[in-house]
Amino acid sequence: MPFIDVRNLHHTYALKNGGTVHALKGIDFTVEFGEYIAVLGANGSGKTTLALHMNGILQPGEGKVTVDGWSTADPGAVREVRRRIGMVFQSPDDQLVATVVEEDVAFGPENLGVAEDRLAAVVRDALDRVGMWEHRLRPPDQLSAGQKQRVAIAGALAMNPRCLVLDEATSMLDPAGAREVVGIVEDLHDTGMAVLTVTHKMREAARADRVIVLSGGELVADGPPSWIFEHPDLARWNLRPPPVTVLATRLRPHFPGLPAGLADAEALASSLVTVGQS
């Protein structure tokens, strides 16, 4: 049984003018324990709507989402689902609820009933994992955007999840802050945690084991980054391949041995050396 199982998922939003928007249209996919999946798509493709179904923030209009066998639509299962899925949103300010960092990280486990004698250790472990323990007594509003996002990740980790779902978690960060967050996510994945990251950044998607593409509320592609980045329909989905992939495509007629889907400058340079020596 997969860790997350999404079957025929539909979601429709009601508009104030009486109309509707069919945001998800029959989505099917699974997430296995320990997978690293990136979700790509243009604005309005349904990425955030999909992410919000992963821990029951939104309910299916049709179809089903199960997490470790628990249905997100079952009110009695909400606690178990949210123990397993940690959510990190685009704006950390929407997620930070306390006036001191360590109190914010303690909020979730306290509400899960973690014993007082264990709570301090849970908070320290979560903050250590994101490199924010030394800032534990600071107010969140005195932190940089990148530091706030790391605290938001710590708050999710304090719930001891099996999967981290990130919805455009680096889109509001400067390049240095984004690199820090991506590095932390990769370290967490290396420990066995599943990751589902919604992003519009191809470089971040390139780090995933698998990429899912949404377009117009439908799942239109599912495969490794190397296949997705050179897919002939990429432009039709309003997506652009990473610049390195474009360069590799232009170089391939001159270096026929270049592998497909290169998205990293170091990988391209290494491949050019290898091909040149063969």
Image (cartoon, rainbow, N blue to C red):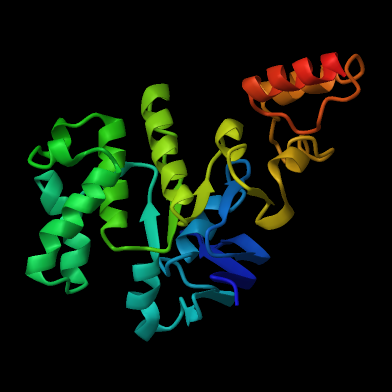
Q: Residue at x 43, y 52 (%)?
A: 191
Q: Residue at x 42, y 63 (%)?
A: 162
State the image coordinates of residue 244 (x, y, percent, origin top left).
69, 21
The quarter of the rendered structure image containing the N terminus is bottom right
Left or right: residue 261 versus residue 201 is right
Q: Quadrant of residue 169?
A: top left
Left or right: residue 232 versus residue 81 is right
Q: Quadrant of residue 277?
A: top right
Q: Residue at x 59, y 72 (%)?
A: 2
- Residue 145 makes an appearance in the image: yes
State the image coordinates of residue 254 (x, y, percent, origin top left).
90, 14
The quarter of the rendered structure image containing the C terminus is top right
Left or right: residue 261 versus residue 100 is right
Q: Residue at x 72, y 29 (%)?
A: 262
State the image coordinates of residue 112 (x, y, percent, origin top left).
22, 72
- Residue 93 makes an appearance in the image: no
